[in-house]
Image (cartoon, rainbow, N blue to C red):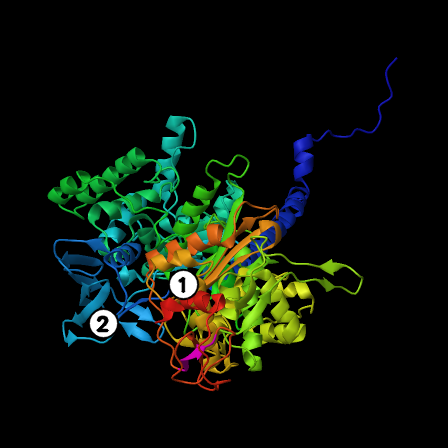
Amino acid sequence: MAKKAGPTRARTPRRKQESSHSGKPLLKPRKRWKLPLVSLLLVLLTIFGVWMVYLDAQVRAAFDGKKWALPAKVYARPLALYPGLLLSEEQLRAELTWADYREAPVADRPGTYQRRGSEWLIYRRGFPFWDGAENSRRIRVSLSGGRVRALADDTGSQPLLRLEPQYIGGIFPAHNEDRELVRLDQVPPVLVAALIVTEDKRFFEHWGVSVHGIVRAMMANVRAGGMVQGGSTLTQQLVKNFFLNNERTLSRKVQEAFMSLLLELHYSKEEILEAYINEVYLGQSGRRAIHGFGLASRFYFGRPLGELDTGEIATLVGLVKGASFYNPRRHEARARDRRDLVLDLMAQHQIITEAERIRARGQALITASPRRAGQREYPAFLELAKEQLQQDYRLVDLQSEGLRIFTTLDPWIQAAVEESAEQHLNLLERGRPGLEGKLETAAVITSVDGGEIRALLGGRDASFFGFNRALNARRAIGSLAKPAVFLAALRTGDYHWGSLIDDAPVTVEGRAGDLWQPENYDHQSHGMVPMQTALSHSYNQATARLGMTIGLQKVVDELHRLGVRESLPAYPSLLLGAVSMSPLEVAQIYQTIASEGFVMPLRTIDAVTTSEGDMLSSYAIRGKQMYDPVLMEWLRAGLEQVVATGTARRLQSLPQPLAAKTGTSDSQRDAWLAGFDNRHLGVIWVGRDDNDPMPFTGSSAALPVWEQTFRKAGAEPLSAPRGLKMMTVDPQGTLLADGCSGEAYPFPVSWLDKPRQACNSGTSRIGKEIRSWLDWLF
């Protein structure tokens, strides 16, 4: 049976059917994918553009503004030379060494000196002093008998010449970076050329990124199987150090590359090179990071860049590859090999001749000591200087503006007190088990006429940045308070040094019924003694009786007039020094005595200038005359007798006269010596931080440190008093009329004192004692 035929439908091939819609179904999907892609690209380009604008703003803001936070540079006093100055050969040589001068057969360039017998020829460097810059010049100094005999320069005799001051530290920002900025025209061309051929031969050809260098580094790293070489240009190194951190990621490298391109777009090669020379890290000095070739030159070789030889320049350039790894002080062999490689490159590129290369390679690699005076810091002094500066300047400005701070520190006196303290404390501890390393010390030394702090010792370890005992250790001052008692007595007009006072036992009842019964150090009573003897021998009983007689409040008032700022309790024990003070506060009291009654704040700062040398502040002597100078001469005469006949007799080994007072607190917990000559006042403290007793007194512990310090620094006898005269005193301590003879003895008194009675020629034990004690005055 045949099938029924139905309508027929032609089968069109699938591909043909799809193509019958004019191709539209194929175009629509392409548009759907293309539009999001274009949008994404636009977004990415926008983000990239914004990012580049941000990077560009960062680069320009940093380079157009202040590039570095420059710490204030702090300098000691300059050595002022003038005929008659007390100056030993040892000190002059030390001062020149600390200022990094080199002795040479001929002083023919700045920074050198030669000696011919007693004459020293010094080629002084130029320096921007606070009162004006001075150029380099040759000066001649003739010494004789420990003093400057003559002073001249190339123009003839001079009344005053100065050597540049020693760097003693900085006021650093938190990162502790330090640098000495140099302009490109101040850098030896040979150093610039050596840096380029060693670190970036194509520096003047690329635009901040060197494709050739990157490819070369990649090939070297592949061959080595690790990171052995970098492809960074000098520009990239500068960007990394200046803007970025040491993170090793692809994103950071990309950022570094684009910032390098932007840097090259805006700034010249010379500007970039100058910034790199001042930025590159080249070593570490304790807490201080050494950045830039200017500071590295002084740190490693003790001279400015312009004074370095070829081998020294090559050594510094070699440090760029790794300042720690090639440190010439710690790794001399590595540093020498690296130096020689740099010298080879310099000769290969005709920066130096072959003869210069051979000569430089043959030289020993010698660096200056990192602990030399010109590079070490003085933490105790710097703490006080920083504290005083902040009365006028913000800390952020001191840490970032590159100010120059000219201080009063005398490196010679500072070295003397540091050495003396260490030697004597070692001697005291020797052979005493349990005491070794337990003794501590502090010292303050000032100028008599200006109150300038010349030395400050905060502890046995002079380099320690920590507890500063000179400022912050408040200890009982003991017998150092006694001169205030005797001064109060002299001011009443009822006493003079020949007045007799009783050294019998004293008992004072307190408000609570407790008894105060001081004893003498020798546990003996000495009867009636001249007031001078009571001070010279530091009799506690006589001093306490005198103080109670004239009144406690008068003694308290005297201490305040002498410079004590804090309130003091009017307790009887105050008379014998039962009050705690720091060495700096004690120095303030004795400064008033040494300066003939002129109360002046002790200061550390002479002047402050900008980094360009413009004056910002100049600190003159400030103060007030609180005492009649004659009264202070009278008190000084008593303190001179402490040295001549009393507890400070050991100081007679120094030129006389000197004035001093020893002090020992209860149970011998604190040992003190405060004294002065014609130029300097010194306060020395010795004790234990745990406040335990010591087997020492002021005479045995503190006095020898003072003596050794002033022997080394140079002691100058006190000038003769101008306002005193000698008057006779009878055996009962009464002033007699002029012309009296017999058993009558001279004491220094004020011109205002009048005789109390006519001549008396009686004799007594007291009179003979007075004569023996006062033979020194004739």
Residue at position x 44%, y 57% from top? 262
Element assignment for label 1: helix
Q: Residue furthest top?
A: 1
**Residue 726 placement (x, y as % from top left):** 40, 79
Quadrant in which the C terminus is drawn: bottom left
Residue 232, horizontal then vertical, whole percent = 39, 44
Whether pointer 2 and pointer 1 mark residues with C-beta atoms closer than 8 Å, the reply is no
Amino acid on which the number 2 mark rests in the picture: Pro
Question: Which quadrant of the figure has residue 362?
Answer: top left
Give the residue pinned by disc 1. Answer: 644
Magenta span main SS: strand
x and y percent of residue 746 in the render?
Answer: 41, 75
Q: Please tell me which residue lies in front, 409 or 508.
A: 508
Judged left or right of residue 387, residue 153 is left
Whether residue 62 appears in this view of the structure is no
Q: Which stretch did the figure color magenta?
A: 723-730
Instruction: State which quadrant residue 377 falls in.
Output: bottom left
Please report whichever mark, 2 or 1, sits nearer to the chain's N-terminal start. 2
- Mark 2 and mark 1: Cα distance apart in space: 31 Å
